[in-house]
Structure formats: C-alpha cells, structure tokens
Image (cartoon, helix red, strand yellow):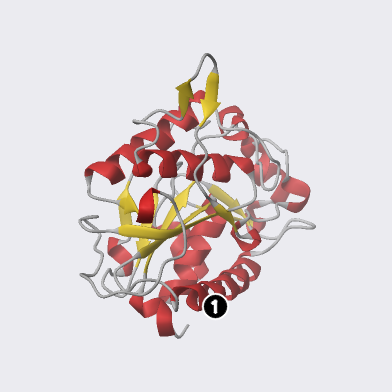
C-alpha cells in the first residue's frame, strides 16, 4: 500500500505475553483471558530490553505531542521515543502494553506493581484501537491447538515449522480479511502520524495472526509467504519502517514456552 505519512514514522508492533489459553494449548482468538505469570515476565523482559536499548515515552506517558525536528528512530532503539501507545481491546494485549509503558516511563522499575500496603497497578495511558484485536477464530475458538488438522482437514491448513494455521473454518476471519483490516488500520495510523513529532514512533500491541498480517500489509507481501517466513512469538517486537527491510523486522525476541 502507499505509505504516505507512514513513511515518516516508525511503527513497532508487539505481540502480547503468554496468556492462559496459550499456556493450555487452546486457540483463543477473541477469548479474553489474562496473562500468565510467565506472560507478565515476558512483557517485563522485553520492556527492560527496550529501555536498555534507549527506548522511552514522551513525557513519561503516552500523550499526543506537537511536531518537532530530530534524528530518525532506528532498530537499535537509540533515540526512539514513543508518542503514542495503542493496544488491542483484549486484556492480554492491554496488560502487556501497560507493562511496557510502566517500564519505559520509569514508574515500575521493571515490576508491574508497586507496594503501598498492597499491590497497586501503576497506570500509564494506553489507548485502545479496536482494529488491533485478534482474528476471529470462528468455530475454532476455544478448541485445542492439537485438533486443528483433524477439525479443518489437510486442505484447510497451512502448516509451518511452528504452527498449523487454519484457513477458513466457519465463522472465522480469513487471512485476506485480516489484510484488509490491517490496511484500514494503517490508513488510520497515517492520520495519527501527521500530528506526531518527526522523530517519534508509535507502539502497537496486538496478537499473533493479526500482527503478521499488519506486517504483510505494510510491506505489500503475500499472506501465505508471511505465515511461513517467521514465528511471531509472545512479547516479541517487529519494526515496520521504510528504513528497515521486511527481512530485518524482528527487533526483540523472547524464549517461547507455549504448548
């Protein structure tokens, strides 16, 4: 797609940490399950990596800001400032975004809670974008991951080294559907980018299937190729930028433990 103002902004796309369904080998889709303890640790690990690499939040939070001149952001993170942080409405993504923000703003010291007699969440502004929600899994929602081939048939699955992707079960969004939603989202992000400082970046916290299709839409790649190209694991981060080629998109990776 034509990038327009998107060509001037760096988009960092993160997947949420491990949630209860991931841990139990269940296809979650839009089921709204909480992060596991491991998922919170994954988010903290990546948040600390970002902070160590020089990432920060504008004003210590995530407000909109007026345009200014400055050095461009890079995959190294040196000088990268997030003006806006957006999340899927599902709590596994919004909680991951919250942990990232707390660490980058210095409000948590690497922990997602602070003690004031009792654990209390340190709230930092994270904005919700509905189009960042995970793919609708249709009839596969809540089913065991091990049952994908049995339920969808060999012809209804695209198999990779790490995941069997179901293609078109009843009621599910297809990958072309996700590409169209990703393009719609990028148009909206383009409008947002018009008002951002020229050196700033945007952080999007989303989900596995949709995150990969957002990558495909940005770089004008075929969805089948992207599904085979790489694994987008829990709390991992991709950089979408004109200065970063499609093959260099992975910025931060974490150890994966899902069933």
**Residue 181 drawn above or below residue 122:** below
Q: Position of residue 66 (x, y in %)?
A: 40, 72
The reply to whether residue 214 is in sight is: yes
**Residue 189 drawn above or below residue 123:** below
Residue shown at 48% from the left, 59% from the top? 212
Residue shown at 53% from the left, 20% from the top? 119
Q: Position of residue 245 (x, y in %)?
A: 28, 70
Q: Position of residue 103 (x, y in %)?
A: 37, 38
Please, what secondary structure does the residue beneath circle 1 have? helix
| Image-quadrant location for residue 196 | bottom left
Please indicate whether residue 74 sits to the left or right of residue 89 in the image: left
Circle 1 residue: 187
Task: Give the residue furthest to the top.
Answer: 117
Q: Position of residue 226 (x, y in %)?
A: 45, 63
For label 1, count other residues whose C-alpha is less than 10 Å away and answer few (under 14), some (14-19) or many (20+).
some
In terms of depth relative to the viewer, which is nearer, 81 or 236?
81
The reply to whether residue 255 is in sight is: no
Residue shown at 42% from the left, 85% from the top? 4
How many dots with numbers? 1
Residue shown at 65% from the left, 44% from the top? 148
| Image-quadrant location for residue 105 | top left
In terms of depth relative to the viewer, which is nearer, 238 or 7?
7
**Residue 108 drawn above or below residue 209:** above
Please indicate whether residue 113 sits to the left or right of residue 147 in the image: left
């Amino acid at each position: 797609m034509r990038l327009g103002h998107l060509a001037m902004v760096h988009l960092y796309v993160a997947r949420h940490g491990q949630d209860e369904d991931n841990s139990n080998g269940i296809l979650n889709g839009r089921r709204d399950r909480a992060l596991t303890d491991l998922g919170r640790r994954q988010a903290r690990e990546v948040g600390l990596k970002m902070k160590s690499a020089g990432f920060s939040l504008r004003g210590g939070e995530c407000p909109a800001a007026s345009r200014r001149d400055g050095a461009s952001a890079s995959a190294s993170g040196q000088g990268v400032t997030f003006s806006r942080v957006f999340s899927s409405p599902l709590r596994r993504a919004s909680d991951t975004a919250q942990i990232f923000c707390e660490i980058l703003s210095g409000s948590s010291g690497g922990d997602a809670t602070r003690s004031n007699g009792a654990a209390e969440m340190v709230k930092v502004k994270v904005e919700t974008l509905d189009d960042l929600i995970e793919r609708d899994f249709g009839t596969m929602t809540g089913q065991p991951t091990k049952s994908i081939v049995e339920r969808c048939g060999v012809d209804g699955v695209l198999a990779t080294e790490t995941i069997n992707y179901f293609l078109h079960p009843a009621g599910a969004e297809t990958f072309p559907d996700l590409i169209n939603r990703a393009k719609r989202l990028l148009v909206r992000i383009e409008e947002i980018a018009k008002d951002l400082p020229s050196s700033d970046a945007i952080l999007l916290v989303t989900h596995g299937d949709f995150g990969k299709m957002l990558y495909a839409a940005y770089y004008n790649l075929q969805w089948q190729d992207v599904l085979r190209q790489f694994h987008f694991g829990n709390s991992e981060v991709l950089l979408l930028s004109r200065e970063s080629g499609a093959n260099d998109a992975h910025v931060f990776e974490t150890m994966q433990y899902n069933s």
